[in-house]
């Protein structure tokens, strides 16, 4: 495809010797769009897209939207490369810095993945397209901020916009309605039901932590009830004075260790994979499952109306606090030869039609559009929880955003803590040391 008529100005974005980068990085040119491109006149285009929409409802929505986009623009062929979350994270940087970089990729927010790509000038800012397509009106400002970075790639939450997410996410508690007749209103109520499930010979919480990152979700779900939400947010965004090594963060670790000692989790949870754990829950083995809403479609398909969802209750009944935010954003790579088509594709994935399809396929649309009422009890539970969190400003961000290596650092530390190898105080002190070392460049 040649350059479209919408190009108004040109700016040079120098390469920075990113590992795996090609010699033409230094001469890479980024164009700035000033008007909505006419994709039908773009010529024949093959748009290569890497995504991690591989689970039930996620896969269903992206396949349908890709088909609709290609039907709307017969001159565009989407070459989709679908990868698991872990596979995407380990292969993305090499792919976007190589000579055959994809045009559009999903990149995990935070300093670990997206920050590294921004720092290496491997992603294209999309503020110009955001203005053309009015993306600021499409999202709550917080959800756009999560996809913003300063040009250095070392600070996120402010600066230039680098992509859009499709789905809202909540990490909460799925429960088997055949075993739980009343949703707990407090953390003490929840623990009483864990004790009851254990006494009945069931696995109270299905949990697989072999992949390390699920333990972060378990920990932060409890942390949201033991620490002020602003303390968690300030730590993740590395505000002055924020620390992981506090009594409130230790309290969350202590609570989880108490649950380990009481046998509330799956046996050998550190040696059990994430997928086998939720699949056991789907088959009726286990009372609760702490997991994200990306499992809604799979669980609803297998359990029907026998599965419900709630956010972890606090020590007292009241406004909810839960881990969550939004799905991985779709971004445009700096090496894409088709940025206008890529932007139109991202716009298409996040417009009113996309919001409707996300709802139909049992996903939670992150956009502010009104959508048809979701079908199914589980989907309705999630929609209710999302609305309550929005009203209460109750979302806390994923802690693995904090430093470039924090996903591995915190995940490994949580594995050891849950194995009872580290006390809560040793756990938080060790994690804070890793954060301090990252900030000092050691």
Image: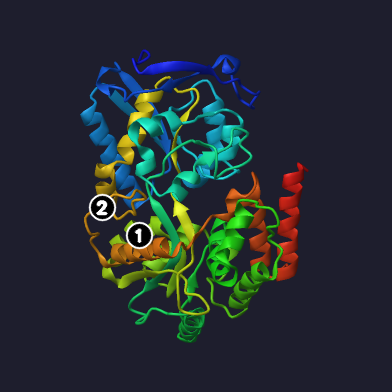
| Mark 2 → mark 1, Cα distance in angstroms | 20 Å
- In the image, taking residue 145 as reference, residue 270 lies left or right, namely right
The residue drawn where x is 36% and y is 35% is: 346
| Circle count | 2
Q: Quadrant of residue 301?
A: bottom left
Q: Where is residue 46? Give x, y as percent.
A: 35, 23
Residue 88 placed where, x, y %? 50, 40
Residue underneath mark 1: 296
Query: Residue at image x 61%, y 51%?
Result: 237
| Relative vertical location of residue 257 with respect to residue 21 in this rendering, above or below | below
Query: Is 123 rendered above or below residue 233?
Result: above
Chosen colour scheme: rainbow
Q: Is residue 63 above or below residue 255?
A: above
Q: Point out the tag, 2 or 1, that comes first from the N-terminus.
A: 1
Where is residue 98 shown, x and y percent of the image?
54, 24
- Left/right placement of residue 422 relative to residue 299 reads right
The part of the image, by quadrant, that contains residue 420 is: bottom right
Q: Residue 370 got which mark?
A: 2
Name the residue located 30 percent from the left edge and 45 percent from the top edge. Answer: 61
Q: Secondary structure at mark 2?
A: loop
Give whichever of 312, 279 is nearer the camera: 312
């Amino acid at each position: 495809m040649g350059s479209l008529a919408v190009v108004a100005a040109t700016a040079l974005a120098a390469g920075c010797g990113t590992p795996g980068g090609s010699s033409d990085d230094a001469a890479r040119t980024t164009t700035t769009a000033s008007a909505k491109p006419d994709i039908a006149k773009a010529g024949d285009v093959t748009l290569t897209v890497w995504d991690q929409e591989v689970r039930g409802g996620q896969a269903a929505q992206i396949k349908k939207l890709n088909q609709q986009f290609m039907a709307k623009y017969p001159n565009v062929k989407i070459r989709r490369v679908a990868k698991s979350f872990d596979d995407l994270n380990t292969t993305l940087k090499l792919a976007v810095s190589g000579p055959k970089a994809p045009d559009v990729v999903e990149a995990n927010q935070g300093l670990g993945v997206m920050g590294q790509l921004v720092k290496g000038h491997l992603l294209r800012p999309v503020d110009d397209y955001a203005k053309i397509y009015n993306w600021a009106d499409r999202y709550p400002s917080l959800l756009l901020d999560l996809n913003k970075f300063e040009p250095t790639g070392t600070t996120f939450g402010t600066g230039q916009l680098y992509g859009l997410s499709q789905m809202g996410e909540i990490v909460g508690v799925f429960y088997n309605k055949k075993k739980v007749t009343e949703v707990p209103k407090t953390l003490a109520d929840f623990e009483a039901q864990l004790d009851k499930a254990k006494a009945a010979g069931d696995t109270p919480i299905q949990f697989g932590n072999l992949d390390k990152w699920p333990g972060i979700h378990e920990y932060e779900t409890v942390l949201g009830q033991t620490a002020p939400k602003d303390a968690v947010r300030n730590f993740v965004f590395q505000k002055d004075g924020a620390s992981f090594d506090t009594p409130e963060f230790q309290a969350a670790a202590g609570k989880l260790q108490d649950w380990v000692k009481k046998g509330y989790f799956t046996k050998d949870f550190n040696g059990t994979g994430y997928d086998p754990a939720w699949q056991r829950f789907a088959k009726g083995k286990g009372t609760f499952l702490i997991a994200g809403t990306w499992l809604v479609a799979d669980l609803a398909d297998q359990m029907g109306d026998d599965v419900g969802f709630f956010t972890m209750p606090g020590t007292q009944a009241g406004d909810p606090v839960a881990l969550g935010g939004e799905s991985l954003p779709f971004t445009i790579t700096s090496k894409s030869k088709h940025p206008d088509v890529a932007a139109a594709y991202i716009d298409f994935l996040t417009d009113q039609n996309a919001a409707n399809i996300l709802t139909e396929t049992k996903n939670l649309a992150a956009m502010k559009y009104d959508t048809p009422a979701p079908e199914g009890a589980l989907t309705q539970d999630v929609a209710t929880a999302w609305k309550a969190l929005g009203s209460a400003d109750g979302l806390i961000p994923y802690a693995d955003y904090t430093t470039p290596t924090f996903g591995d650092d915190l995940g490994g530390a949580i594995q050891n803590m849950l194995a009872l190898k580290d006390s809560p105080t040793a756990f938080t002190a060790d994690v804070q040391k890793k954060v301090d070392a990252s900030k000092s460049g050691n």
